[in-house]
Amino acid sequence: MKRRNKLLPEFIIGAVVIHVLLTFAIFIGVTAAADAGGSPGGAALSSNMDKWVEAPCPTSEYQQKLTQIGFKDTASVAEAADELLKIAKAQSDRCKEELLFLFREYYFASLAKCNEGIDQLKIDETSKDNLNKSLAKVGWTIKMSEGNYYLGESPTWFATEFKEILTATYREYFRLRSQEIREGFSEDAGLLISWEQLRKRIITWENFLHQYPDFVEKANIQPYLADYLSTYLGGMDNTRIYGKKMALKKEVKVSYENFIKENKSSKYHSIVKEFYEMIKKNGYIVPKNYETFLDKKNFKTLLGVQPPTY
């Protein structure tokens, strides 16, 4: 027969009593510190509680700063970039994205304004190199389209200039966009990339938006995707999906078949498949009313439109 330990109940009771007394003493100490205007212990407690509440993102302050800076020249853009780096360093990832988004809105508005006065720069082959060196400080570069100069963005400037504050999402975004800027998209209403490259761009951005549904630049990605889809299904003025006698081009046919086979999870799979099957049933001759078919599916072609160059 097992002997019962008589000391165990007394030990348990003693431990409970000590725990209650310690808890009560801590409560009295914290209360007294608060009544006395705070103590080292109370201050530490208050400090820790403050850390639990994230400070608001200073977007309003930065927007006011951008308004103050305005746009006069590339020095203004450089100043706005410096202010962004100062204000964003200690912020949360979400706040950094919101602040960088504000800068990019300002940046492209400034770029558009500068392009309005492009003739004043009097660009020629002699002055272009020196001017490019000056513009490179803010990520601008001189480009040419259909014989006319214009200012565009450098493919790597954002990723390099703001590497200290970039979130993983923005790093991936800039990686994808820098490649597209290098490759270009169109020139003189003609496609600069292959149909397969175009297919992969569509899937890449669709996957990106699926992976980062709350990305701050989601609304700016949609136009890229819309242009890629419109071109993929309807072509451009100088790059049609068909050749002689409206026959579907071989490279377009192969790409459509790859899309149907490899991209079944895409939300655009059904429209590509239906469009392809319609052409296939017509002996691979693109129907003259194919634009009507796309209109009914809420897809507008880029025919008769000047597509973006990159």
Image (spheres, grey):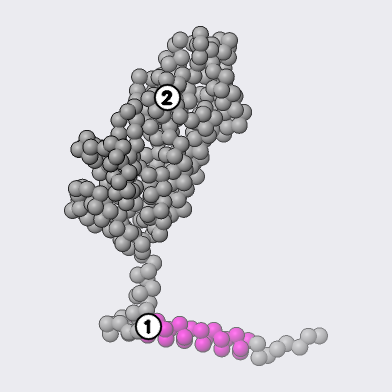
Residue neighbourhood size for the residue with mark 2, other residues' Cα within 10 Å, grouped as few (<14), some (14–19), many (≥20): some
Q: Position of residue 226 (x, y in %)?
A: 41, 30
Look at mark 2 in the image and give the residue it sits on. 190
Precedes in sequence: disc 1 or disc 2: 1
Q: Position of residue 239 (x, y in %)?
A: 45, 21
Residue at 39%, 24% in the rendered image:
189
Q: Relative to 304, is 117 above or below? A: below
Please state if 291 lies on the left or on the right of 305 as rendered.
right
Range of residues picked out in magenta: 9-31
Q: Quadrant of the N terminus?
A: bottom right
How far apart, in angstroms, are the residues tagged by discs 1 and 2?
Answer: 71 Å
**What element does badge 1 sit on?**
helix
Q: Relative to 27, is 63 above or below? A: above
Q: Is residue 214 visible?
A: no
Count the labels in the image.
2
User: Residue 113: which quarter of the image?
Assistant: top left
Question: Residue 41's mark?
Answer: 1
Which is more toward the observer, 173 or 296?
A: 173
What amino acid type should be assigned to the residue bearing mark 1? Gly
Whether 38 is among the magenta residues is: no
Q: Nearer the viewer, mark 1 or mark 2?
A: 2
Query: Magenta stretch: dominant SS?
Result: helix
Q: Relative to 115, is 31 above or below? A: below
What amino acid type should be assigned to the residue bearing mark 2? Gly
Q: Quadrant of the C terminus?
A: top left
Residue at 38%, 49% in the rendered image:
157
**What element does badge 2 sit on?**
strand
Which is more toward the observer, 160 or 45?
A: 160
Residue farthest to the bottom, as pictured: 7
Residue at 56%, 88% in the rendered image:
14
Residue at 28%, 85% in the rendered image:
36
